[in-house]
Every structure is written in C-alpha cells, then in structure tokens.
Amino acid sequence: MRQPPNPPTLHHHVRSTSDGATTAASAAAAAAAAANTSKSPASAGGVLCSREQSQDSLSAALSNGIFNFKWPRSSSAAKDTDDAGFHPNRQRRLSNFSALRTGGVSSWKNLMGRSHTSPRNSIAVSSPTYNQDAAESMNPLKNQSNVELSSSHMYSGPQDQTAKPALPTSLRQEINQFAIDGFAKKYFATHKRGLIFRRRVPMTEMLQWTKDSLKQPLIMLNKDLYKDALRCFKLIQVIMGDRPRPRQSSETEDYQSLLQCGIDKGQMRDEIYVQVCKQLHNNPSGKSIRKGWEILCVISVTFPPSKNLESYLTNFVEQNKHVKENEVDVMSQHLSATLKRICARGAKGKVLTAAEIERAKVSPFKPSIFDESLETIMALPVHVGDGLKIPKIVPFLTNAVLQMKGTESEGIFRVPGDAEEVTDLRVRIENGKYDIGDISDPNVPASLLKYWLRHLSEPLITDEHYDACIRGSENAEQAIRIVNSLPDVNRRIVLFMMQFVQQFTDPDVIAHTRMNVHNLAMVLAPNFLRCPSESLTTVFENSKYEQAFVKTLITHLDTDTTACAYSDEPVVSVKVQNDGQ
C-alpha cells in the first residue's frame, strides 16, 4: 500500500549556532509548526504559519537555551494575550510610554495621571517638599566656627555674633575655580596635539608657562587675528626673557608694539592679558615672573580687559597678594587698584611713551600722585614738603602758568598743551622732580593741572555734597557754606584754586585770553564736580548747574592763598563784599 507523502518541512525560526549546526529544539519546533499547519484548512499549502504559531515556535526554541538565556513566556503566551498583544495577568517591566501603544486620547490621560497604587510602573512626579532640617544641615555657613575650632583643637573665646558670615575658604576657592573653568570652557579655544590621533590639551596644561611658541590663540578669535595673537605671545616671551631678543629691537619698542595691538584691535586685549597670566603660572624663573608682572602693570594703564575676563583677571591678581617672592605681593596690590580705574575709565587713545612705560613699571614701588586719593598723596613726603598743607603740585603748576604769562595767553585753560610736553612734565613730577625744564608754553602746566584735578580718585567736592551743589548752584551763601564743610585738604585746594582763577577775571586779562568767567567756569567745572549718576541724560542736564556753581564760587568767594597753602589754622572762605563783577 502506497504511503502518503510526508508533509513539507517548514524552516521557521531556525537559527544556526556559532558552529553552523541547528539545534534539536529548533527542529522540533519546526516539526510542531508543520503539524499544526497541516490541520489548518486555511494553510493547506503548508507554506505560511499564523502569528500565534510563529510565536509558539520561537518561544519553544528560546526556552531551550538559545543564546544562553531563558525566554520568560510559555508556549501558550499567544493564547493568554489580549488584543494588543499584552498579557493581562502578568506584571511586566514597562517603559514610560507603554500606555501610548494603544493610541487614543485616553492613553495620554493615563500617562499624565497614572495612579500611585503601582509604584513600579508609576511615572508621575511628586511636588517638591521643603525639608527644614535638611536645608539647615546642608548650609555651608552652619558649622563653620565648629569646623575651625575642631581643626585647631583649642578654644578661641566666644564667637562674635554680629560678624558677617563668610563662606569657608575651601568652598570659596572652589567657587572661584568654577568661575574660571566656566570662563575657559566658554571663551577659550580648543587646543589639540598629535599627528594622527589628535588629543585635546587639558585646560590646566594650556594655561601654564611654556618656552615654546603658541600654535593658535588661547581665546577664540577671528581668523584674521591669529597672526597678531602669535606675534604678541612672542613679544611677551621676549620681554619676560623666555625667548632671545632679535637684533635691532629694544624692550620699549616691544612694549609699544604690544600696546598698539591692544589699542587698535579690541579683541586682542583679552588675549594679551591671558597670555601674560599663562606665562606667570608655574613659571620656573623669578626674573621672568617679575617681568611678567611689570607687563601687567604697563598694559593695565593702557587698556582694560573685557567684562567677561574682568572677574577672572581680578581673581588671578587676588590669589597672588600673599606671594612674597619677587615682590609679587606689592605689584599685585598695585595692579588690583589699577585694574579698577582702567575698567571704569576705558582705554587710552594712544600708546605710552618710553618715559610712561618706565614709570608704569616702577609705579608699584613709587606711588604716583595721579589717579590717587588726596589722603594717599598727603602721605608722600616728596610730594608735600616745605610745610605745605596741600599737595606740592598745586602751587607748582599755578606758579608756572603765571610765570609763563598765562594771563596773556589766548584760550588759557581751554587750549590744550602739547601732548608730549605734558606727558614729560607729568612723569618728571611723578618721579619727584618739580622742575619746569625748558617748557615755555603756559598751556602745558595748565593742561596738567586740570588733568591732575580730573583724575583724583575722588572729586574735590565730594559726592555727598553734589546734590546740594546742584540745588544751590546760584546761591552764593549756600555755595560758600558747602565749600567750608568740605574736608580740610579738599577745602584748602578749592579755595586756593578759586583765588588763582580769579586773577583771570580781570577785564584787561580777559581782553588777552578771551576767557571770561562763563568760559572759565565751563572748562573748570568738570575738574571740581563729578556727577555720580551713570545716566548720560542726567550727566548732560546737570552740567549746566555744575558750571553755574563754579561760576558762583569764582565770582563771590574770597580767601587768602598763602593761608590755604601754609597756615596751621583752619581756613574758611567768606563772601566778597563787592558782588558787582
């Protein structure tokens, strides 16, 4: 009797092992699938199997150890699943978006408002809870005194309850370092090295001394400034002695080239500052370190850093205020004050002369009488002396103007003196040499006198009296009362200057100078008063009242110049008897 033909073998979900053979479990699963297929009328051809059969065969194969892991589903998994293909009675590990698989608006509602009864599958976020105990325990200021006490193992007496709390030193340093790293990550360029595998240079290595040349700028710059950045770094290395100086070049020329680049190209200013700081960090040479701080002293009187770099540079300077080697502490203290002034006033419009560069280099050790407070200047014997009660520069320059016949010079106090002669005279005075030299133009000492008054760290008429000056700008008695209430040195200088300026209000003098009392008040007012407001509109509106106040003083004030300069007794002003000027 003829036997019926064997049903065709279906190779469904048969995976080969690593050696190319098929497993017995795979073959058994295929046979089972073929038997089920032959019983189904819909698959009489024996070619396709249903979804359920495919899942059963795959589960059977995986359950026997393929890939060395067990499949958690049983052979009847397909029968126990719902319409969406999920097991209704088994708790499974679901993703946060499993609720969306069935679609529909209700699924979104289920996602956003899942019940808290199933914390394993819950994705709802609870509202923040304030824990007072935890907040107090994490406060870095809470146990600061206790930490300091335990570290020293000795009792230092009761703590001052009124003292202002301060962050611990370690935490403050970490915050400062975080600010520096944040600036570096945001503004510093990425440096890489290596021919084949280009590895990034760490920030700490990039910002430390090197004897090699730079391959690219430290800060992200425009492509057209790359050559300027590399050239400036070579100049810095030459000045600091880290690179041989080329022939036919001098240190002054190197300084001036560096300053010229910073003045002409604003983006290069931060690059120059950072390059100097880089060469000062971990520098092995004491002489090079001193030269580097001298560079900072010179460029800090020429142009400021940007607002982004200002805090980083200030932090760098502050960290070196306790370094005694190479007198870094003195130079960093001076540099801190210089940076504040240059950031407030802005960059100079011209490169420093050779004399100004030399003066800036020694300024930390020989304080200047420019850009300083009257209290500081009066503490310098070389700039006071001879029993004077006011700085020596005031009578020196006023006498120079009169000796050079300033009363006959047209436009006196309005026409500026020669810039180079003014600079040379300023440097000469800063070095303690009160000698007019061969200067014959009265506009030179007049210009320098206005410069000194205008660049005092605090104005002659202090900020606390400014509003009263504006309100009583044309009231002679109130104006004189304000002057008499100024600090002693301020009052003496104001009285001395007003008595000096009154010599130019004579009609015969005005015929030569073309400078009447209105013109004198206009050019001299900014040297006595400074509007504390940062609003340009307010500054402009108040300028007319400032001029009116100075005009009132010139017209109505009376005093003795000799007493102002030398008298030990307090000097006050009175109103002139003749107000008909």
Image (tube, helix red, strand yellow):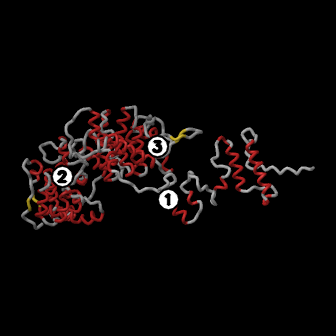
| Circle 3 crowding by C-alpha within 10 Å: few under 14, some 14–19, many from 20 | some
Which mark is first along the chain, 1 or 2?
Answer: 1
Residue under label 3, please give it: 231
As drawn, 213 above or below 394: above
Which residue appears farthest toward the right when viewing the image? 1
Q: CA distance from mark 1 to mark 3?
A: 65 Å
Residue 510 seen in this snapshot: no
Q: Earlier in the sequence, mark 3 or mark 2?
A: 3
Query: Is residue 351 left or right of 436 when viewed as pictured?
Result: right
Give residue 283's quadrant in the image.
top left
Numbered badge on residue 398: 2
Disc 1, SS = loop
Say which quadrant the C terminus sits in.
bottom left
Q: Is residue 219 placed above or below 470 in the rendered structure? A: above
> In screen coordinates, is 427 left or right of 234?
left
The amino acid type of the residue labelled 1 equals: Arg
Q: Amino acid at mark 2?
A: Thr
Q: Position of residue 233 (x, y in %)?
A: 44, 41
Q: Position of residue 417 (x, y in %)?
A: 27, 54
Q: Position of residue 440 (x, y in %)?
A: 24, 50
Extreme residue in the front direction: 1
> Could you tell me the amino acid type at mark 3?
Arg
Q: Nearer the viewer, residue 571 or 171?
A: 171
Crowd around label 2: few <14 · some 14–19 · many ≥20 (10 Å): some
Residue 114 is labelled as 1
Q: Is residue 197 left or right of residue 9?
A: left
